Amino acid sequence: MFSKQMAMIVGIIVLITISIMMLSLSSRRPYPAHGPGRFAIALVAPFQKAISHTSRFFRDIWAHYFFLVSVAEENAQLREKAQQTIALQHRNEELMQTNERLSKLLALHRDLQQPGVAAQVVGKDPSPWFQTVLVDKGRQDGVDIGYPVINPEGIVGLVVEAGGNSAKVMLITDPNSAVDAVLQKSRARAIIKGGTSGYCVLHYVLRKHTVEIGDSVISSGMDGVFPKGLPIGQVLEIVDNESGIFQDVSVMPYVDFERLEEVLIVPPVNPPKPT
């Protein structure tokens, strides 16, 4: 059985070979020859057609594969460019916001008409008992203990520690902070100190003075530290203590300490004389 199959396969191969040879010989004539030539064409044609279709099939698959690879590479390049564009937009937006804040800080510096050092907030005290931040300017930049710290929104705090290249600033929301203040509308003087939950408290406001919600509180300049007229905050709540001569006033600071990034450090109004 095996030998008959082999003989049949060999016979087909020989027949195809002879047909191809005859077809080759007959192809030299301008027209197909009669007899064996035409027989060879009829015999070989189906095999040529099958080989041609198979070759075209694999060629199309190969071309399609390279097309998909090219599309995948192009998509990867487009995604990378899109990511770079988004990152560039974020950087540009950050630069625009920083430029806007620094422009306001520069305008504040010009309005004060006194020397000052611009600094960036680089750290914050995690302790809930103290409200302080760390800035990147120190004694080498002309910053010293007791220097007021402000920004375009108002008073930030006071320098309480100064190193060579950094300083610690106690915020006005710290319980140990104290600023001589005045109610802008009634001109009543008081002392504003740090309270709780980011608020301040205006102490020693006489009951005879009229205080209203939303009144502005500014620095009086009488403490010899902060320049006069700097914004501090606005009245949020009034506690009228009928048993005393004073009324306690809660104040919301103008400065958003959660978003504090740049500050201006200026010399005190009356700097202490060196001993």
Image: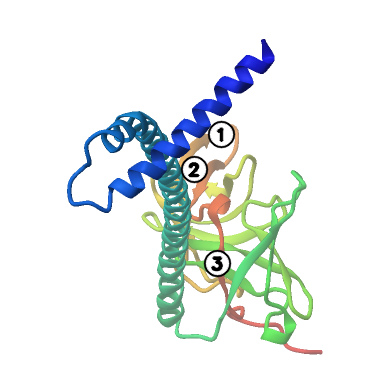
Of residue 190 and residue 152, the one placed in the foreground of this image is: 152
Of residue 10 and residue 233, the one placed in the foreground of this image is: 10
Q: Which residue is mark 3?
A: 262
**Which numbered disc, 2 or 1, marks the residue that appears first in the sequence?**
2
**Residue 117, image x and y in percent?**
58, 80
Give the numbered dot on residue 207. 2
Q: Residue at x 81, y 89 (%)?
A: 275
The image quadrant that residue 52 belongs to is top left
Q: Nearer the viewer, mark 2 or mark 3?
A: 3
**Which numbered disc, 3 or 1, marks the residue that appears first in the sequence?**
1
Residue 204 horizontal side relative to residue 134, left or right = left
- Specify the amino acid type for callout 3: Glu
The image quadrant that residue 20 belongs to is top left
* Residue at the right extreme of this rendering: 275
- Do residues under tags 2 and 1 come within 8 Å of each other at their CB atoms? yes
* Residue at the left extreme of this rendering: 31
- Do residues under tags 3 and 1 come within 8 Å of each other at their CB atoms? no
